[in-house]
Amino acid sequence: TKPILTVTMNPSVDIVYQLDSLKLATTNRVTSVYKTAGGKGLNVSRVLHQLSCPVLATGIIGGNLGEFVTQQLDAIHLAHDFLSTTYPTRNCLAILHDGKQTELLEPGPTLTAAESVHFIQHFANLLPKTQLVCISGSLAQGLPSDYYVKCIQLCREKNIPCLLDCANEALVKVLHSAAKPTLIKPNLSELSQIVHQSFSEDLEKKLIDVLAKPLFAGIEWIVVSLGSEGAFAKHNDHFYRVYIPSIEVRNPVGSGDATVAGLAYGLVQNLSDEKILSLGNACGILNAQENETGKINVQKLAALREQIQVMKIK
Ligand code: ATP
């Protein structure tokens, strides 16, 4: 079978420094260092790979850090076909200290107009080799905010389902365009920002009203992830609430990406709505139970899915 294509436009080499305490304006000696390939699309790729779903990772990389990203993927035999730029891939730094996490995020390379066009061609060339596309995360600097609209248009022309997990202007541009993704997966705060509304009380009723707005018309699936509260979903005219068991959490960063991977894998297998949603949420939960981002314990998947309840609302 053809792979799922994941798109990461601004990947990173994530560095985690562990310190007892962080002292400002002086020298700090780091006790332990981890370096991993980061970016939301890469998290999706790793989870799909652990689910034994064929996957091909694409996006833009550059320089030595770009090579580090591809070496990390090679090490786990995860297929990739990135476009290279002259500017190096970024570092993102997380410092764990005093029981807290301080992050320093580089913006990443600024792409030229020629590179912007070049990637679209690269992406179009990969489409015939793929059965579904997952686009995740923010755009690289230099790309127009409607860049994902162009990517989705190409998917539509080729009749390839396209899942989009991004926020802010890049998402708003897609929602206002004619190029409809097959699925979007905002979390509640991303949804709040788009519709300028808060969801403090009467959550389900408000979500039904909001997701029925013309802004979301034409998008087959909208999955609103609710962290430890599970998820709420709309598939065409059907609404669902996903109830999940309470679990011991290690590190929930990237749970949304794991959820996207599970949803994508459910979609390519043509599962029922209920099964797609339980698979997505189970992957999100399993990611939250690991320290590492984009890691799931597949052994626990089947039993966990039994504990997830998907209720049809309307
Ligand atoms: P990220 O941006 O870090 O990838 P997100 O905000 O997009 O995350 P969440 O809503 O936090 O996504 O999580 C996605 C799914 O993962 C949830 O719908 C839920 O199934 C599971 N999940 C996340 N956090 C928890 C938690 N603390 N306990 C149990 N399940 C969780």
Image (tube, rainbow, N blue to C red):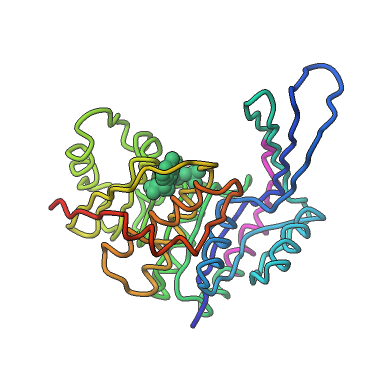
Does residue 167 appear anywhere in the picture? no
Q: Is residue 57 above or below residue 112?
A: below
Q: Is residue 266 above or below residue 195?
A: below
**Ligand 1 quarter of the rendering:** top left
Label total for image: 0
Instruction: From the top left corner, tell me how far across and down residue 109 is, in percent.
Output: 71, 47
**Residue at 73%, 66% in the rendered image:** 75
**Residue at 56%, 54% in the rendered image:** 294
**Residue at 57%, 55% in the rendered image:** 295
Position of residue 129 in the picture relative to residue 61 (left or right): left
Per the image, is 109 magenta? yes
Given the current orientation, which residue lies at the most extreme left position? 314
Instruction: From the top left corner, tell me how far across and down residue 16 is, in percent.
Output: 71, 40
Per the image, is 232 magenta? no
Position of residue 180 in the picture relative to residue 286 (left or right): left
Specify start and end residues of the magenta stretch as a single range.
105-121
Depth order, front residue of 194/50 = 50
Toward which corner of the image does residue 272 lie, by quadrant?
Answer: bottom left
Does residue 183 appear anywhere in the picture? yes
Depth order, front residue of 10/100 = 100
Given the current orientation, which residue lies at the most extreme bottom position? 1
**Residue at 57%, 75% in the rendered image:** 125
